[in-house]
Image: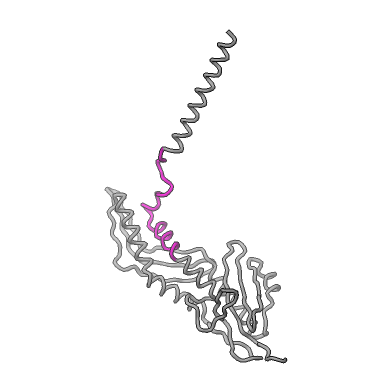
Amino acid sequence: MVNSKRGQTTLFIIIAVIIVAVALLAFVILPSSKPIDEPIQEITDPQAYITDCINLELEPIVETISEQGGYLKVPELNLTYNGKTFGYLCYINMNNKPCYNQQPLLKRYVEEQLTEEVRREDIVRNCIDNFKKNAEKKGWEISTCPIPSFSIILTEGKVNVPTNCEIILSKGEDYKRFDNLEIYLDWPLYDFIEVSRDIVWDEIHYSDFEHLAYMILHPEFTIDKFRAPESKVYTIRKKISGDMFIFAVRNYVQSPGI
C-alpha cells in the first residue's frame, strides 16, 4: 500500500514536470503577438522610423569627424602618430611663434561637411523611401514628397536634422499627415567644438592650455593632453557617453638648441 502511494506521488511529479516543460517550450517557440523587431510606432509614426534610419547612417560620419579634429576628410595639415591621423585646429610652420586658428568657424564648417555628406549619400531620401515600403507592406496607402528638404544644425548635445517633407498615411478611415520631422542624433559634437575653441584660444594667447583646471570647472569632460614631437594632441571625452573629440596643435615650438 505504501509503495502504491509512493508510485502515485512519483507519477504526479513527473506529470507536473512535463506540463511545466511544455508550457515553457510553447512560450519560447510560439511567436509573440507584438514582435519586438516590428514596433507599432514604425507603422504609424514616420518620425520614429526615419530618425532611427538616419541616425544609423549619420552616427559613423559624426564619429569620423570627431576623431579627426572636425574634419571628415583628413586635411593636408595633419599629424600621424601611433597609427592615427588627426587634423590641426591650430598650426604654424615656424618656431617660437603662436599658431593660427585653422577653423575659426568650426561649427559652421562641421555642419557644412555633414550636410554635404548626408546629401551625397542620399540618406534622408533613402530612409523616407524605406519607411514608405515598410508602411505599404502593412497595408497603408502613403504619399511622400519627391525631394525632402533638410539641414544639419549642431546644438548642445544634439546633431539636429530638421526635415521638411509631407508624408500622408491612410488606411480605411485612419488618416495621418506629417510635415516637419524633428530628427536628431544624441551626440555632443557641439559641446566638443565649444571646448576645442577654448583650448585653441588659450594656446594662441597663453602658449598652453591648463586642462586640469578646466576639468574642475567643467567636470562633465575629461581632457587628455599628449605631447607629440613638436605638437600636442588633445583628446576631449564626455564622461557619461564616452564620446570623444581629438585634434592636434602646433604652437610655440622651440627652436633646436633653445
Residue 38 on the magenta segment = yes
Say which of 48 and 180 sits in front: 48
Residue 69 on image: x %, y %: 54, 76
Residue nearest the observer in this picture, 60 or 156: 60
Q: Quadrant of residue 256?
A: bottom right
Q: Residue at x 55, y 76 (%)?
A: 85
What residue is shown at x 50% (from left), y 29% (from top)? 20
Residue 132: % across, % down = 32, 57
Image mark count: 0
Q: Residue at x 57, y 74 (%)?
A: 83
Decide which of 181, 49 is in the foreground and name it: 49
- The foreground one among 56 and 81 is 81
Residue 102 horizontal/vertical position (percent)? 54, 84
Left or right of 69: which side holds 228? right
The magenta segment is 30-57
| Quadrant hosting residue 211 | bottom right
Please identify the quadrant where the N terminus is shown: top right
Q: Residue furthest top?
A: 1
As drawn, 1 above or below 57: above
Within the magenta stretch, is there residue 31? yes
In the rendered image, the vertical position of residue 98 relative to residue 119, given as above or below? below
- Name the colour scheme: one colour
Q: Quadrant of the C terminus?
A: bottom right
Q: Is residue 35 left or right of residue 138?
A: right
